[in-house]
């Protein structure tokens, strides 16, 4: 629960700070100005992309192999790096606009992103622990269910052994 709470809290705060960044030019704009809906939605893309990539990383039963590992971790790493760089600048600018000192404005985004990273890896670790509790074949199937697929005799062998015992 703590991992989910940290990840969701970090994600919501990051989205909020990124959207707030679109309002920063307001003091230099004419009275009544507001940022476009497109710029506000666009600014939220980065933390949401990170959230979704961690979800995919932790919940999809990936196939083994180097290409799959590259797709899995390389893809998520690319999203995380891009989101971190863009979001970092947005959050830093918001903190500066709110009067935070230079050090705090530079450390604040790291703390927020760090919370999301640690919580995301905790979720990933928990998903691996949960998936190693049962041997799985196809997405979410245990060996018993997997043996019932055409061409897979694992279930049939167990059924015959069970019937022979009595």
Image: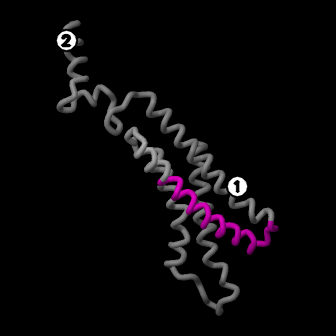
Total numbered labels placed on residues in the image? 2
- Furthest toward the bottom, the residue is 30
Element type where label 2 sits in the image: helix
| Picture residue at 59% right of the left edge, 84% below the top | 34
Identify residue for label 1.
111
The span shown in magenta is 75-102
| Picture residue at 50% right of the left edge, 60% below the top | 49
Residue 143 appears at what percent x and percent y? 31, 27
Residue 90 appears at what percent x and percent y? 64, 70
Identify residue for label 2.
163
| Picture residue at 40% right of the left edge, 46% below the top | 67
Q: On the image, which quarter does residue 137 sit in?
A: top left
Image quarter in which the C terminus is found: top left
Question: Which of pointers 1 and 2 lies earlier in the amino acid sequence?
Answer: 1
Contact, CB < 8 Å: mark 1 with mark 2? no
48 sits left or right of 17 in the view: left
Q: On the image, which quarter does residue 151 sit in?
A: top left
117 sits left or right of 147 in the view: right
Magenta-colored stretch includes residue 160: no
Relative to 40, say whether 12 is above or below: above
Relative to 26, say whether 21 is above or below: above
Secondary structure mostly seen in the magenta stretch: helix
Mark 1 → mark 2, Cα distance in angstroms: 59 Å
Residue 21 appears at what percent x and percent y? 63, 74
Element type where label 1 sits in the image: helix
Q: Nearer the viewer, residue 3 or 63?
A: 63
Q: Residues within 10 Å of mark 1 (few under 14, many from 20)?
A: few
Magenta-colored stretch includes residue 78: yes
- Furthest toward the front, the residue is 66
Relative to 163, say whether 19 is above or below: below
């Amino acid at each position: 629960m703590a991992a989910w709470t940290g990840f969701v809290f970090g994600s919501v705060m990051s989205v909020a700070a990124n959207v707030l960044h679109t309002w920063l030019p307001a003091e230099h704009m004419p009275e009544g100005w507001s940022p476009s809906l497109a710029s506000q939605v666009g600014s939220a893309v980065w933390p949401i992309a990170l959230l979704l990539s961690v979800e995919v990383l932790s919940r999809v039963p990936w196939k083994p192999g180097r290409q799959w590992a590259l797709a899995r971790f390389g893809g998520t790493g690319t999203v995380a790096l891009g989101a971190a760089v863009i979001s970092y600048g947005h959050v830093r600018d918001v903190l500066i606009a709110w009067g935070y000192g230079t050090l705090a404005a530079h450390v604040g985004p790291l703390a927020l992103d760090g919370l999301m990273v640690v919580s995301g890896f905790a979720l990933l670790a928990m998903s691996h622990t949960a998936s190693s509790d049962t041997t799985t074949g196809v997405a979410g199937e245990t060996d018993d269910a997997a043996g019932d697929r055409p061409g897979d005799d694992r279930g049939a062998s167990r059924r015959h052994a069970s019937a022979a015992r009595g």
